[in-house]
Amino acid sequence: MRLLFLAVLRPHTGNAVTAQRVRAHLEAAGHVCVLKDAFDFESPSEIANLILAENCEAALALHLYRGGRLLQGHQIPFGIIFGGTDVNEDANQEEKNTVMGRVLEEARFAVAFTESMKEMAQAQWKARQISLAVTRAVPVQPHAKGKIYVQSQGIATTPNAAFNWNTFLQRSEINHSADNLHIFLLICGLRQVKDPLYLVDAFSEWHQEEPSVYLVIAGPEVDPVFTREVKAKVRRAAGVRLIGEMPQEDLHAVVKNCFAVVNSSVSEGMSAAILEAMDLEVPVLARNIPGNAAVVKHEVTGLLFSSPQEFVHLAKRLLSEPALEKEIVVNGREYVRTYHSWQAERDAYQQLIRKLEGSAED
């Protein structure tokens, strides 16, 4: 099949990495996958022209709103992969919720990264169907039920073996002895939903007590206005550094060399950075939100915090309790190997894409 695949393709972001991985899975099964950035299109008519020009027989979208809304009404079957913010954030806006409900009705299948995301989507659009039934006096059609499949993200890490850690520290203006350093790495695009400034004040205060600890924020400048705010804040914060986006292999090498990976997001679908850290045997400290709690079990596969002060408390525990660090690392690695198999993800998508073959009545 020739498939159109719409996703947000900002370089080195979670969505872009997921899209590239899913495309590779589908192409390995013999499909032709035309991957396009959803932000390059403003209307379904542009997509209609693209479908015609590329001779696409079916389509796939990553993100129910950003990609999915462009696929409606083209008379080709399509599937959806939830992105996270579509279910967690966009669904709370009435207009977007209505659009996404219609997309879900038309989709042959939808993929959620976690069971909790599936349940949230089902509840969200079941409520919409009940509302329609009341206002239009039509029977409830639970369009989400039965078509949402749970498939965790498949993880494969590839750290650059030639990466020079000391050069990286010098570039980041971290001049401590490498043996005595404890780098906490926060990987995120600079946008408000990732909340990269959440821990800055508390961490900076801790750094002044304990100069060997540093917080390094790594990721692309997604929101230009917010990026300026982040840069201004970090410039004034002792012990906090900001670095730009990096090739994935180099980023994996940084993860492997740091003390812990941090996630402070307000909302997450499923954080690949957390799972990659587990795979690379690096402990994780994550903000206690549903998307993170779905993969991080407190004191088992990582540590969950609900305030900056609790983060510092848990980080200090991790530094002073080697047995806890070791247990978290072992359990995290085992969790990723068991539940986030790259091969299992490949098999699942190759199976699901068959639902797009043939007519809607098949």
Image (cartoon, rainbow, N blue to C red):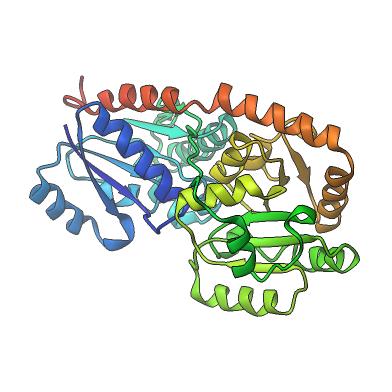
User: Looking at the image, which residue is at 44% across and 36% down?
Assistant: 133
Residue 106 visible from this viewpoint: no
Q: Quadrant of the C terminus?
A: top left
Q: Which of 167/278 is in front? A: 167
| Residue 255 screen position, x and y as percent | 61, 48
Residue 337 visible from this viewpoint: yes
In this rendering, would 125 be left or right of 284?
Answer: left
Q: Quadrant of residue 336?
A: top right
| Residue 53 screen position, x and y as percent | 8, 51
In this rendering, would 329 be left or right of 191?
Answer: right
User: Looking at the image, which residue is at 49% across and 47% down?
Assistant: 160
User: Looking at the image, which residue is at 40% across and 33% down?
Assistant: 110
Q: Which of 101/13 is in front? A: 13
In this rendering, would 361 be left or right of 163?
Answer: left
Q: Quadrant of the N terminus?
A: top left
Q: Eyeballing the image, is 296 above or below 315?
A: above
| Residue 127 screen position, x and y as percent | 52, 38
| Residue 17 screen position, x and y as percent | 42, 46
Q: Which of 347/161 is in front? A: 161
Q: Eyeballing the image, is 300 above or below 71?
A: above
User: Looking at the image, which residue is at 61% across and 41% down?
Assistant: 277
How many labels, in total?
0
